[in-house]
Image (spheres, grey):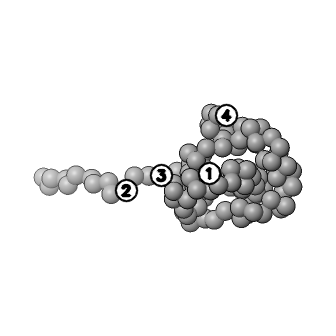
Amino acid sequence: MQAQSPVVIVTQPGYSVVPQNSNWQTSMCDCFSDFGVCLCGMFCFTCLASQIAADMNECCLCGGSVAMRTLYRTRYGIPGSICDDYVVTFCCPQCSLCQIKRDINRRKAMGIF
């Protein structure tokens, strides 16, 4: 009888529906590509943050946070760092939120959200 060698798992199976390397669908200051999102972000920041949190199946209080931006960016393989996310969220929270919502809308339209 021959002894069987143990099975060694080198990588864990993962679940991914998007490419590992992706980019934002729009730039930070591309507000006029979706004027409705821009208006919502400027005049009803909390509503837009809640919409994003709902889209991401997260707590409604987290929509405008650095953590939400980081979660979204890593989920879709968008390059960047937590430091970048902090600076963007701190310097222009409305632009950050609008960019995420535009990206969600475009990914939904493409069927990859």
Q: How far is disc 4 from disc 2 in space, using C-alphas?
A: 34 Å
Q: Earlier in the sequence, mark 1 or mark 3?
A: 3
Task: Tell me: 75 left or right of 24.
Answer: left
Location of mark 3 (residue) = 14
- Of the two numbered discs 1 and 4 in the rendering, the one whose residue sits closer to the viewer: 1
- Local secondary structure at mark 3: loop
- Local secondary structure at mark 4: helix
* Residue 27 drawn at (x, y percent): 71, 64
Q: Hey, what amino acid is under mark 2?
A: Thr
Q: How far is disc 1 from disc 4 in space, using C-alphas?
A: 19 Å
Q: Are marks 1 and 2 in contact (CB under 8 Å)?
A: no
Q: Earlier in the sequence, mark 1 or mark 2?
A: 2
Location of mark 2 (residue) = 11
- The residue closer to the viewer here, 39 or 79, is 39
Q: How far is disc 1 from disc 2 in space, using C-alphas?
A: 37 Å
- Of the two numbered discs 1 and 2 in the rendering, the one whose residue sits closer to the viewer: 1
* Neighbours of disc 3 within 10 Å: few (<14), some (14-19), many (20+): few
- Of the two numbered discs 4 and 2 in the rendering, the one whose residue sits closer to the viewer: 4
Location of mark 1 (residue) = 90
- Residue at the image position 78 percent from the left and 63 percent from the top: 30
Task: Tell me: 108 left or right of 83.
Answer: right
Q: Hey, what amino acid is under mark 1?
A: Phe
